[in-house]
Image (cartoon, grey):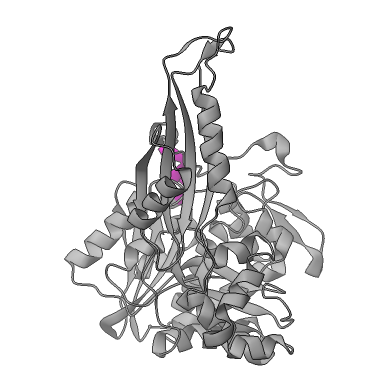
Amino acid sequence: MNPSVDRFRELLRIPTVSHADESETDWAVFDDFAAAMERLYPALHETLTRERVDGHSLLFHWVGARSDDPLVLMAHLDVVPVVPDDWEHDPFAAEIVGDGEDAVLHARGAIDDKGSLVAVLEAVEQLVAEGFTPARDVYLSFGHNEETAGGGAQAIVALLRERGVRPGLVLDEGGAVVDGAIPGVVVPTAMVGVAERGVMTLHLTAREGGGHASTPPSYPATARLARAIDRLHRHPFPTRLAPPVRAMLSTVAPHAPQPLRALFRSLAVTGPLVAGVLSRLGPEMNASVRTTAVTTRLRGAPGDNVLATSATATVNIRLLTGDTVAGATERVRRVVADPAVEVTLAHGSDPSPVSPWHGDAWRRIASAVAASLGGDVVTLPYLQLGASDSRWFTAISDHVYRFTPFHLTRAERDALHAHDERIRVEVWLRGIGFYRELLSAS
């Protein structure tokens, strides 16, 4: 087996699982992971300086020919929990099924996000061993709790800001190389996130006096809450084309068939129509053209025969570029339209700033894509639907991008945070080439 793949498998077998309640996280495992990295990548550790930040995050510094406008490559050490019985293969055995081009590596973290992390390590190790010195300083930022609080990345940003470091290019996990992501477009597209949606959580709470379930009131708190949830579901946020989505469609227009080509080239006129159509073409397209809100948790009475004194719904909202936490909260109150249902903000952050899809930083990413992943791949700006640690870096850089350099199928993308996460070995190895190209151009 390829030595790079062997190292990847060894790191995948270390279960760096993070939990929302960090007291449940086994931090000793993260220490084991850091020790394994040092053993597996000796040239990297001899040349780059390494710091622990916020306990378990790792920050590496590779001194280049100049220190201004450094490159930051991001990834995270932690993975989400698993339900082993749901998996066809042991999630931490890093088992390879098949041979040659059909070989598939099954493991939690194979894509999210040890795939990128280990590909970065491999690229740096190879370049250091070859005697390469980057034109600019390079930082490797590996957060330990991206899947939960993101405190590690925030601490790294604070440290870099204190040192006066202002990166010229930051690249974190994000969109992949995909087929058929945009209706009618058959060329493979590298989806590079130039922004990400904001994220917030609201609680809807209806209250009543309580009592025995044998004598319910005419309109109990649970029914009032159910009506509020139904209203929210039946009145979604309006559709529109945010600037990153508009840029994506305009850029891909030459590769789209008619009449889509004409529609994508005339978005100043056709934008509302296009947004409405895209919203009906599946969850990903819908999430690209509107702020989404979904009830994720319900809480009521403590017993089967007890009336709830309060019934609460947790609503997760992802904000489209241009929307705000304050505006979304007020809209939910208007839609619920019931003063007896309390709407409270648990936490939230507005959408990230939008990074440019032109200029030197963008060209470096697009060139690395073409050189390593195929000249037929079209690099597109897009709006990242989920949140990542990269949002914290927008405080110190105007060029923050989100891209995972792997050609992923729909089924492979669906396995993220679910069971049977996996990546094709050949696809992962090509990803190393992407980071080598990007580092060589930096």
With respect to residue 136, does 139 lie above or below?
above
**Residue at the image point whose x is 42% and y is 38% from the top:** 203
Q: Is residue 249 left or right of residue 35?
A: right
Is residue 296 among what the camera can see? Answer: no
Residue 25 percent location from the top left of the image: 44, 36
Q: Is residue 371 left or right of residue 364?
A: right
Of residues 309 and 133, the one drawn nearer to the viewer in this rendering = 309
Which residues, given as a range, are shown in magenta? 27-33
**Residue at the image point whose x is 71% and y is 70% from the top:** 426
Quadrant location, the N terminus: bottom right
Q: How many labels does the image show?
A: 0
Magenta stretch contains residue 71 = no
Of residues 118 and 253, the one drawn nearer to the viewer in this rendering = 253
Corner quadrant of residue 433: bottom right
Residue 154 percent location from the top left of the image: 30, 56
Residue 63 percent location from the top left of the image: 30, 76
Residue 386 percent location from the top left of the image: 50, 59
Q: Main secondary structure of the magenta part?
A: helix
Of residues 5 and 156, the one drawn nearer to the viewer in this rendering = 156
